[in-house]
Amino acid sequence: MTMYGLRHPLLARTAAGAALIALLAGIPAILLIFFWPIVLPTFDDLATPGEPIVIKSLLLATVWTCWALFAAAVTVEFVGVARARRSRVRLPFQRLAAYLITSITVAATVPVAAPRALIPAAAIAATSAETPGQTAAGPHQTEITEAYVSYVVQQRDTLWTIAEKQLGDPMRYRDIIALNQGRTMNDGRPFTHGEWLQPGCTLHLPVDARKPQYTRPRTHTVAPGETLWGISKEHLGKGDRYKKLFKLNKGRPQPDGGKLRDPDVLEPGWRLILPKHGRDNRVQRRTLSRHAAEPAYRFSSAHSSDSPPSIASSRLASGENIPSPSPGTRAVSLHPVTGSNAPSPPAPTAPQTPPSDAAASPSEVIVLPQGGMMALSFAAGITVALAATRLHRRRRLPAPTTDEPISVLAPEPQPPAVRALERAHRSRDTEAEPLNDLEVVSSAFEIDPPITLKAGIRGEDPVHLPLSGLNLALTGPGADDGIRAIVLDLLTQADAYRASILIPTHDAERWFGNTIFALTDHLPELQLIATLDEAIHQLEEQLVGRRGLLQDYEVDDIHQLRQAEPGEPLPALLLAASCPDGHPYLDKLLTMAADLGLGAVLTGRTAAGTTCSMNQAHHVTEATGPLAAELRDVTLFHLPPDTAASMLHTLATGNGMPTEHPEQPADLPIPPSSATPRPVRFILLGEPSIDVSGTPVDLSRRTKALELFVLLALRPKGLDREEICEHLWPDLEETLAGYRFHAALKDLRTALRDASVPDGKTAHFIERSGRTYRVDPQHIDVDLWAFHQALADARTATSQQNKLMALEAAASLCRGQLGQGLKYDWLDQDHRWPLTIASVKALLQLGALHEQAGHNERALEVYDQAYALDPDMESAARSTIRLLATLGRTDEARQRARHLRTRLNMLGVSPSPETQAVLQQLSMRPLNSPQ
């Protein structure tokens, strides 16, 4: 907190200063005024410790000792601040001293090396250096050139600390002055000792300065007989961390052309990337770059899939030498190139390198149908939220009553942008096995806070900005859209205390509409603050608190602190606000937050940070500040208001927000039954299969023919060619999609005719009526149609026995989920889960009818069938547990209860009150005792 909760910077500084003066000067003043001269006790007095003079002397000695220790702690802290180094000395009261001094410096100062220039001088890079005592060479003087090393000034650098770290001797700061004396700075002034160092500027250092150290990604070459468990135990310390190893390498191309798809299948010779947080992890910093002897560094697109994205990718792509990044730009992926044809080695890994899958390419940028552009990784976050939404909705569904009519419901309509994002994510890896919703949610769980923000693209290269210490202001007509994109992208990564976002209430309403206030209860990572001043106050509290933690754990930055204390919740914190004229105090806070995981994005301007002007097309036309080179000519990611509002709603429902969607039965007209047997039998419930007169038909090599068959079977009324092409080839031009449609139709008809008896060789199987194509019900029987007919018969049954028979017919058809194993976006989005819900409800109703009739064993079979069909529907699991307990099979019931709790824990929710009541009754039962 700030001093006594004071929010005004001047008051905070004044209070901290007054407290410091009172403790340093007030205590000895009071002691000297009221207790001077000090009368020491005699030996006779000491013989009777209860004497007042003895007690008084002991108290005075204690107070003077505490004051002396506090004064020493203040001295140590002042020296540490002045030298820009955290002191290694530990004294009593040092935390109090650090707190007071930090409160003063937060409110009144900026770091030693700051954008507004507050420390002894730096200069920009030059290609030569004058000798000591020599000024700029005149026209008749011979310029003396010396070899040197370039050093980019970092936050809180001083000449003393630079000399100590890079030259090994702090007294050699004079050598740095000699090499840079008289050089012209970027503002036109000559370097003179006594000016201030400016982060981002380049100093010349003597040639014996330390060379840059680069770290490459750690890899392991698989040997015969090795397993992921063993490799994980060897390199990561624990065998059960093999899942992280598998996730990191899943789908990566290997030297033999194969890919890791099964954690139990490893081939000798494969090279596995090891996580950066392994046993032999070392925190290394890159601050130097040589001008002459070192090779140039340029971006290598060949490694884009495995390398972290470059912040200054366009400069690297051209092979331009750039100075080493400041702490705000550490996550730069560089590859040394010694020649035009030299192969690029693996990318070096910086301490806080963003995940390799964040690297973008043109195919990893999504242009949304109603306006907007986002990275494909954002689509992954939305897909996870949709999967979690379906899980929450299915989990909350109650068991139907015995007289409730059951129908397959029409799917809830989704905004076009949300559908496009889910489709883009699902089509990213067409070869991978499809995951169910729980697997999608659990596989996306991550605990490492994000360290970069996805800003946009320059040409084909992604641009990522460091979140820690970020001070970015956007102006122009596209600024609000850019802010919305940054906030929402960070929200998709904000689970498990990974990130937190502060937005003043007025700005939140302007950017996202007034519906945001109804969503915040289900977006705990999004904090709406009444005013900008209060938001800055919270930012200040975090800064002071995190500085204290760095002091306590004796580490230098937030990255090391997270490694030292992984249990400490230290999310990335971003302030998003409107500051048309800038905010000087916020600028000061952010310059001090470069190593604390705090940042801000603003609409308006900033004096100390980076200001970008955006046009209507969201292209940066002008940029000034420390990150100007990285953001110039970049097209920023952006979201219009309506699209952003739909994304927020999706994220809120993914966090458990209930939605009221009017339930409407799906309109599926059931074709009339045929008087003659149909030769073609098409099974869609469960794993799809086709047989013609008992002969199996394999369409695995004719994938679009199979997809066409599935689509038309789900639409018995038929579809016209344009509707079919929109489902199967949404990204193709209309003419080309039409050619593909006719090719798929021909393949389907040919496959069915080839398997038919002679009488069926002339059948079309797929009829055409005008512009509509549909499945011929006289030749093809689809189990899905029979299932819908069984549900219709159950709804219209006039007796319980007739209803029981209809539901038994439906249960016999429930062999699995619709199109099990098929990866069709439109199938998942519109058909699969509504049909699964209807199937489970029909089975639960059938089980309840059997229970009423006293057929408990048959009821248990049906409940088990429902649970196997969808183990995430809590009502199915509850019915099974309750009946098992009733039958006296308590041990099986408790095993099912443990399994249910595990799945609910993976979703992060608690059992419903009905389930808790069943579990409570179960816990009070002895093993295997009937009711």
Image (spheres, rainbow, N blue to C red):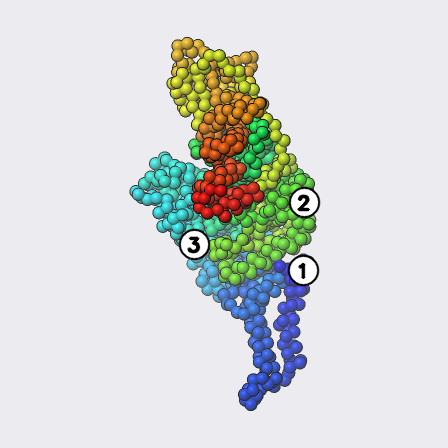
Residues packed near mark 1 inside 10 Å, few (<14), some (14 to 19) or many (20 plus): some
Q: Earlier in the sequence, mark 1 or mark 3?
A: 1
Of all residues shown, which one is farthest toward the bottom? Answer: 44
Residue 542 location in percent, x, y?
A: 59, 55
Q: Amino acid at mark 1?
A: Leu
Compared across the picture, whether 204 is left or right of 107 comes to left
Residue 276 location in percent, x, y?
A: 43, 49
Assign a secondary structure to mark 1: loop
- Name the front one of labels 1 and 3: 1
128 over 803 or under it: above or below: below
Give the residue at mark 3. Answer: 282
Assign a secondary structure to mark 2: helix
Which residue shows up at 46% across the image and 30% down it?
A: 816
Which residue shows up at 53% across the image and 15% down it?
A: 672
Residue 774 location in percent, x, y?
A: 52, 17
Q: Determine the CA span between mark 2 and mark 1.
A: 24 Å
Quadrant assignment for the N terminus: bottom right
Could you say which disc has been placed on residue 507 in the image? 2
Given residues 908 and 403, the one toward you in this image is 403
Q: Earlier in the sequence, mark 2 or mark 1?
A: 1
Q: Amino acid at mark 2?
A: Asp
Assign a secondary structure to mark 3: loop
Q: Earlier in the sequence, mark 2 or mark 3?
A: 3
121 over 816 or under it: above or below: below
Give the residue at mark 1. Answer: 6
Q: Amino acid at mark 3?
A: Arg
Which residue shows up at 44% across the image and 19% down it?
A: 681
